[in-house]
Image (tube, coloured by chain):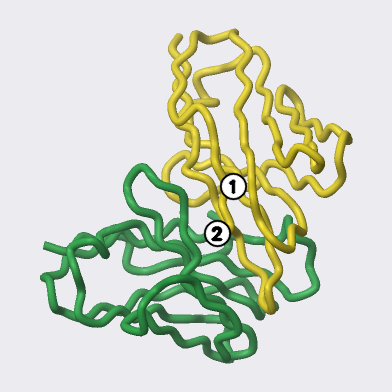
Amino acid sequence: ETGVTQSPTHLIKTRGQQVTLRCSSQSGHNTVSWYQQALGQGPQFIFQYYREEENGRGNFPPRFSGLQFPNYSSELNVNALELDDSALYLCASRRLGQGDYGYTFGSGTRLTVV
Amino acid sequence: EDKVVQSPLSLVVHEGDTVTLNCSYEVTNFRSLLWYKQEKKAPTFLFMLTSSGIEKKSGRLSSILDKKELFSILNITATQTGDSAIYLCAVVVVQGAQKLVFGQGTRLTINP
């Protein structure tokens, strides 16, 4: 139990479909970032939200988008799913100004695209 | 492009052995280096390193950073089967926003 909850835990989608993944952060954690971890790889930064606005983005196309809500929850949306989108998606939250040790990761959503 | 490389990618040892995991990096705007243990899904925090030459220690685990040579090592002594996991090295970089740049991870297997 990390204090950061992600849902669903597993998901199977068909190529071309759209998916929404959810993350519920700890109270007071006003920064949330999303990472994609392909099998056998380290997590890759998708984007970060602070106070409901995107303030950093990795090398991911615009079909990856997100939202952050005032209640410390957030969403990752992926449109036009491709087979290579199959991965574990992790969200990590922290309170801005907290030390770098303060990232708390959720257990992830494993997405399979067929 | 920011890059973090871990070695070895996979390691199998016997219980009681000592292991050393390596992490080298080439990034702009380095802020700190983090080590995580990933057993099933959620990475859990082990160490944060910001200064060269200062060893961080927690039980059988220890880690050190060399900012001149741009690498870090994670040592585990007297390994136990519960140490079996993927160990991730991540560098915190700040370019506007702050982000973690991860290495590929080292999959450590401890056999009884």
Q: Quadrant of the N terminus of chain B?
A: bottom right
CA distance for labels 1 and 2: 7 Å
Q: Secondary structure at mark 2?
A: strand
Decide which of A78, A1 is in the foreground and name it.
Answer: A78
The chain letter under disc 1 is B
**Residue A3, image x and y in percent?**
58, 63
Give the numbered dot on residue B80: none
Give the numbered dot on residue A105: 2
Report which quarter residue B93 is drawn in.
bottom right
User: Do discs 1 and 2 belong to a common subunit?
Assistant: no
Q: Residue A41, relative to residue B109: is it above or below?
A: below
Q: Residue A78, relative to residue B48: is it above or below?
A: below
Decide which of A8, B95 is in the foreground and name it.
Answer: B95
Q: Residue at x 45, y 31 (%)?
A: B9
Q: Residue B40, relative to residue B8: is it above or below?
A: below
- Do labels 1 and 2 touch, CB within 8 Å? yes
Residue wearing tag 1: B44
Task: Using a 10 Å C-alpha cutoff, classify the residue at mark 2 as few (fewer than 14 neighbours), some (14 to 19) or many (20 or more).
Answer: many
Chain A: colour as depicted: green
Identify residue type, mark 2: Phe
Q: Quadrant of the C terminus of chain B?
A: top left
Identify residue type, mark 1: Thr
Q: Which chain, by letter, is yellow?
A: B
Q: Residue at x 66, y 22 (%)?
A: B76
